[in-house]
Amino acid sequence: MLFVRTGIILLIFARSWMFFTSGNIGLPVTVQKNLLPDSLTPGKQLALKYCTSCHLFPEPSLLDKKTWVNKVLPNMAWRLGVREKGYDPYTDIIPEERDLLRSLNIYPEKAILSNADWKKIVAYFEHEAPGKPLPQQKHDSISNELTLFSPKHIVFDDKQLPRTTLLKFDSPSDELYAGDAENKLYILNNNFEFKSAWNVESAPVDIDFPDNEPPRLLTVGSVSPSDQKNGRLVTFDTTFTVQYPPVNIDHLPRPVQFAYADLDMDGKQDAIVCGFGNNTGKLVWYSDCKISGENVLSYMPGARKVEVGDFNKDGKPDIMVLMTQAWEEVVIWYNQGKGKFKEKKLLRFHPAFGASYFELADFNKDGYPDILLTNGDNWDYSRINKNYHGVRIYLNDGKYNFKEKWFFPLYGASKAVAGDFDNDGDIDIAAVSFYSILDNPANGFVYFSNEGNFNFKPASLPDAASGKWLTMEAGDFDHDGDIDIVLGSYFHNAEEMTSLITTTGISSFPQLLVLLNRKN
């Protein structure tokens, strides 16, 4: 599940967390061939100093001049305490959020640098940035013929706007759980027919199905960017016959995903929660799934997804996590025993990278998990097409060092899942794009057929133009031995739907698009 975020490009707070570095890891950047004029050198030096106090240095080529000058740099100025006389950056923020932001000192009252120095930074970015966003690198065209899947439109509630926040299939019960931003949780059978609906505390974003216990449900608190802590992880008991102590962990900062493992090796499961937050967040685990057992790994915002595994083969479960927001990176927390963890950074990205999702799969069949990652979060101060957005594979060298092997540019890429969809023995990829208005809206879903040697053939189908796909689930829904896919549509507002109608001429928008695999 991916949530709307501010995509903070340059964030100044919690000075004790600052790290000082520059460069650009994992991303090719267009090199400026012209030498920097002497008059702009001080601006570059100041930019390196102040930008890298919070994240990797964002090269000017990442965005166009207009976006830098009119959108991103003004927000950075506020975070450095630079503002026009009499201007209050808190004016348009609701009181509850305003008080939180003031307590965090997000927009300092006292400027950290002079107006003259700030103007030098602006001049540097304005001079060095391209006039227009840079184009994508050359890539295979996306075919509009995809015969492997048969599409089926699903509507199970009378809603003006589809706003699907969760899709999760419980194969033992043959039930699909679909969450909605209007604080609803729907249960469908494996034919995608309505079974029941439940009112919940806030939008459902994740759920799991433990053996012999009721599901455990995560609710986000606020879909929109927020620093309020209204999320909750709770036992979802529809039979009201729980035999085990129910889980009830509240006061979570916009949590978006969770996992379970016995991290402290006491024979009881612990809960690991990604508190995405906004300006602050929380990557945290709870011993025995109790609030009193809280162990915080990081207060950084943007914890998106965790994978648990014994990555160093020492018999203890470790945690791999994708962090987004300004500090974009993939990190392993190695379990040292007795509740202690040691951090190792695997991949780091610049703050406009837009990391959105990852999962593990062994693409080269060497016995070590590789990383499948999407970056395309574009709901921030720079809502432009970015040539570095897309789907990526990072290969594991066997020592958990990762290097990019494959990249396919896809504007707004928000999620990708790996699986042998065509049953030929290798791993294919299904991906969705959510955050961009694509030239061809059907490319909001792209299937990559693995042709060998990291040659993936991209294809989509016309029905994919009938929604904005935020959520995706894969499974053998019809029990025929192959992997099917279901997409969940999410529209922020009616204007987005109107735009899609104008672009495509389509006037009917399902909540779900089911892609039944025809292989078997």
Image: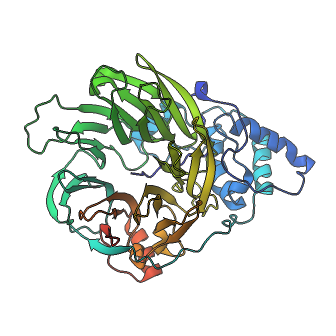
Q: Quadrant of residue 288?
A: top left
State the count of labels. Answer: 0
Is 489 on the left-hand or right-hand side of 278?
Answer: left
Q: Which coloring applies here? A: rainbow
The quadrant of the picture occupied by the C terminus is: bottom left
Q: Nearer the viewer, residue 457 or 14?
A: 457
Q: Position of residue 181 (x, y in %)?
A: 30, 55
Q: Position of residue 151 (x, y in %)?
A: 33, 74
* Image position of 327 with respect to 413: above or below: above
Which residue is the extreme one toward the top?
338
* Image position of 320 with respect to 391: above or below: above
- Residue at the image point whose x is 29% and y is 62% from the top: 481
* Image position of 148 with respect to 412: above or below: below
Q: Quadrant of residue 14?
A: top right
Q: Position of residue 398 (x, y in %)?
A: 57, 38
Q: Nearer the viewer, residue 286 or 453?
A: 453
- Residue at the image point whose x is 35% and y is 46% from the top: 222
* Residue 283 showing in the rendered view: yes
Is 93 on the left-hand or right-hand side of 383?
Answer: left
Is 270 on the left-hand or right-hand side of 113?
Answer: left
- Residue at the image point whose x is 68% and y is 65% from the top: 137
Which residue is the extreme one toward the right?
38
Q: Position of residue 54 (x, y in %)?
A: 64, 35
Which residue is the extreme one toward the bottom?
505
Q: Nearer the viewer, residue 444 or 144?
A: 144
- Residue at the image point whose x is 29% and y is 74% from the top: 152
* Residue 13 showing in the rendered view: no
